[in-house]
Amino acid sequence: MRHYKRIERGIGEYIAGRYRRAVEVGIGNNPDAARVIAAAGGLMLCTDIRPGIRHDGLTVVTDDIFEPDHRLYAGADLIYAVRPGVEMVPPLIALASRTNCDLLVYHLGCEIYEDGGDVVDCGPVLLHRYHRRCP
């Protein structure tokens, strides 16, 4: 489990150094990346489909990525997900496109969606950028 926490901290450090208004989709019981981003002042909020998820110091709201409340993501410069199901990637891309923000995904193992998007080396792992914000 220690290895996964190092990965999540590395993801958080990468995002915290590049984005000012990030939203994590599907936080579940893994708040480490969000905590790093929040400590740097770059986290808007986190979402999860399951109600009642709480993490001290983080704003977590219930939302379904398949039917998202677009108001939650307004103003974000990044939407990211850590180990989402691959079926979540198409609606994440659609949401990032509509919100006009970057989308970064850290996949479980060798799982990728279609061509894998742009591969981003964030140090401990590779992230996949499936959408880039339009200027």
Image (cartoon, grey):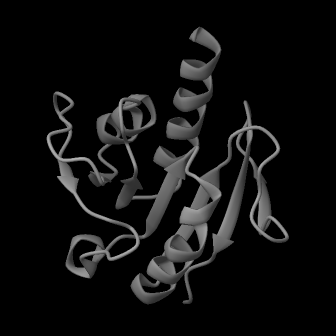
Give the number of callouts.
0
> Which residue lies at the image location 77% right of the left edge and 57% below the top edge?
112
To which quarter of the image does residue 40 belong?
A: top left
Q: Is residue 22 above or below residue 117?
A: above
Q: Quadrant of the N terminus?
A: top right
> Which residue lies at the image location 29% right of the left edge and 46% below the top edge?
41
Q: Please state if 44 lies on the left or on the right of 114 as rendered.
A: left
> Who is closer to the viewer here, 112 or 79?
112
Q: Is residue 11 above or below residue 64?
A: above
To which quarter of the image does residue 79 belong?
A: bottom left
Q: Please state if 9 lies on the left or on the right of 53 as rendered.
A: right
Q: Quadrant of the C terminus?
A: bottom right
Where residue 59 sits in the image (x, y, percent)?
17, 46
> Which residue lies at the image location 62% right of the left edge and 27% below the top edge?
7
Q: Please state if 53 lies on the left or on the right of 120 as rendered.
A: left
> Who is closer to the viewer here, 80 or 76?
80
Where residue 93 sits in the image (x, y, percent)?
56, 76
> Which residue lies at the image location 22% right of the left edge and 71% below the top edge?
72
Where residue 45 sits in the image (x, y, percent)?
25, 53
Where residue 89 sits in the image (x, y, percent)?
59, 67
